[in-house]
Image (cartoon, grey):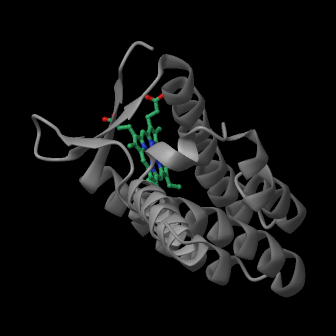
Amino acid sequence: MTSCKLGWLLVAVLSAVVAVFAYKFTVGEVKPSTDGRMEVQLSTDERNALLLEMRTWLQSAQGVLAAATAGDFAAVASTARASGMAAEAETPASLFRKIPLEMKQLGFDTRQKFDDIAADAEKLKDRQHTITQLSIAMNNCIACHAIYRFSDTGK
Ligand code: HEC
């Protein structure tokens, strides 16, 4: 085989490898669930980490609402930031492969929305604006819960 042919073969093999990774990254590790949703297959630790993240989101949502009602915009900002992009660092890296792209996008968008709530609270100090932002952000909670659930593969 000439070195040119070998080069093309190498390109073809590498392209196939990249395509497989890209596909896995897009679809993630999911199975249809008994309740009609899609079940994301996770290890015990990964599932626990994500459920903890979820409880933090619920806490932030309540915290934003309580602080906005009290007109305490510094508290709105700090409680919203606890669920913002910076907290993403706590998410285990192994999850990026397992979570479908659509779910990742909804997750990142939710974090971004909490960061926007924090930034706007500091800038505008407008209670109605904060509450409207939270209400819109919580549509992401509803959308994702309607499509996905987590299963514990025990590994
Ligand atoms: C990107 C998808 C996604 C988004 C966005 C999302 N969740 Fe979840 N959440 C899930 C999944 C999946 C579960 C597990 C449900 C199951 O297995 O039945 C879950 C579970 C939970 C739980 C249960 C936690 C536990 O300990 O059992 C709470 C509380 C929760 N979510 C709150 C929220 C709130 C509040 C928001 C919005 C601010 C939100 N979630 C946004 C995917 C999401």
Rendered residue at 19%/47% (across/down): 37
Question: Is residue 138 something one can see in this rendering?
Answer: no
Note whether 88 is above or below 68 in the view shown: above
Q: Is residue 131 left or right of residue 27?
A: right
Q: Nearer the viewer, residue 64 or 6?
A: 6
Note whether 17 is above or below 128 in the view shown: above
The image shows a total of numbered marks equal to 0
Residue 69, percent across and down? 68, 63
Q: Is residue 57 left or right of residue 79?
A: left
Residue 118, percent across and down? 79, 69
**Quarter containing ligand 1?**
top left
Rendered residue at 81%/56% (across/down): 86
Q: Nearer the viewer, residue 49 or 17?
A: 17
Rendered residue at 51%/47% (across/down): 97
Residue 108, percent across and down? 59, 64
Rendered residue at 80%/75% (across/down): 121
